[in-house]
Amino acid sequence: MNLRRYVWGMIFLWAVAAAMPVPASADKTYPVNLDVSAGFGFDSNVPSRPMTQDDDTRLLGFGKGDFFYEHNVTVGYTHPLTSDISLQLQYFLNQNFHFRLGQYDMFSNNISLSPTMRLFDNAAQVVGLFNFNYLDIGSDKYRTVYTVRPVYFHQLTDWLMLETAVGFERYYYSVAVAANQDNPSAKNFLTYLGAYIFLNSQRSAYVQARFSFDANFAAGSNWDYDGYRILIAGVFPIVNKLTGRVYFDLYNQYFNNYWFDAHKSNNPAYYFNNPPFPKREDHGVSTGAQFNYEFYPGWSAQTNLNYTRNNSNIKWYQYDRFIINLLLTFRY
């Protein structure tokens, strides 16, 4: 990678952050928010491919690990329309650069518009999310996503809050595919129901539980599925100005069609060495922890540890992956 360009880019980000004034008090609100973060990490399986080397997985390449540098910028503006309705416009940029596997460098741009309506004397609120995401992998356009997802929150008691949402996502992938059946571009319908249990009066410590369902209607039959997900998470203060978050995310994806292997059409001998493929099923788990320490007003250090294991009856989709990173963040 062009290390000089990225180092100068990081210096520029921190110069912008250092020039911003320090917030006068934690309880004062501002219509504009700015988050800038940068740091380094390690990804054990950058392409999310099978780690096992055999004759079949060699056709796709196996998982490879690499160190990376990343930076993130979030700029948001909140405009109050009335005492109960506000509108937030936000732009988020995430970019990482791998030291060896530059073909997997990621550049993600995200624009969201979120109107918020408070109801029932602030006991409930509806947050509408309209989101656009554009993602490059390496130097190539990879994916574009449009999302509409209104979320309803209701504070039942001082210690219990419920949430529910329905949504629609439209995915457009630009990756080349060997066969039409493997085109992942899709329309995705989703819904979820969750709850937050607060453990203190400041609501800085809580446990979250959420059940999700999504139905994916893809252009390629290999990617039609129904998905079920259970998320359990907890946020808690550890010591003064040090906060931790842990999560456990269990998901199951049941694909609706018999899996089509494009390599069979290109290699007749392959058919005789492999049995017919069933309908694909993925059963995965993702778990991790995050720790954030505010060492100066507006400045914090954050570390993230994440592990993912995806089991599939189609072995080319089995993989393990862990990611660890350390970020320095300025928040205004």
Image: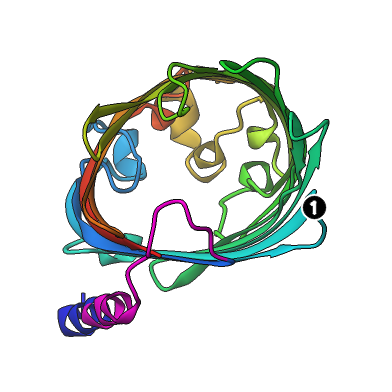
Report the residue at 36% width, 44% height from top: 60
Q: Position of residue 97 (x, y in %)?
A: 27, 65
- Asked if the magenta segment contains residue 252, the reply would be no
Residue nearest the observer in this picture, 19 or 114: 19
Q: Position of residue 71 (x, y in %)?
A: 31, 65
Report the residue at 34% width, 39% height from top: 49
- Asked if the magenta segment contains residue 20, the reply would be yes
Q: Secondary structure at mark 1?
A: strand
Q: Is residue 228 left or right of residue 93?
A: right
Q: Is residue 93 left or right of residue 111?
A: left
Is the C terminus in the top left, top right, bottom left or bottom right quadrant? bottom left
Q: Position of residue 243 (x, y in %)?
A: 28, 34
Asked whether residue 223 appears in the rendered view, the answer is yes
Residue nearest the observer in this picture, 35 or 38: 35
Circle 1 residue: 85
The quarter holding residue 173 reads: bottom right
| Up-down relation of residue 258 to residue 30 (above or below) | above
Q: Is residue 282 left or right of residue 96?
A: right
Q: Which residues are magenta?
A: 11-30
Q: Position of residue 2 (x, y in %)?
A: 20, 80
Report the residue at 35% width, 77% height from top: 20
Asked whether residue 189 appears in the rendered view, the answer is no
Is the N terminus in the top left, top right, bottom left or bottom right quadrant? bottom left
| Up-down relation of residue 86 to residue 154 (above or below) | below
Q: Tell me the amino acid under the disc marked 1.
A: Ile
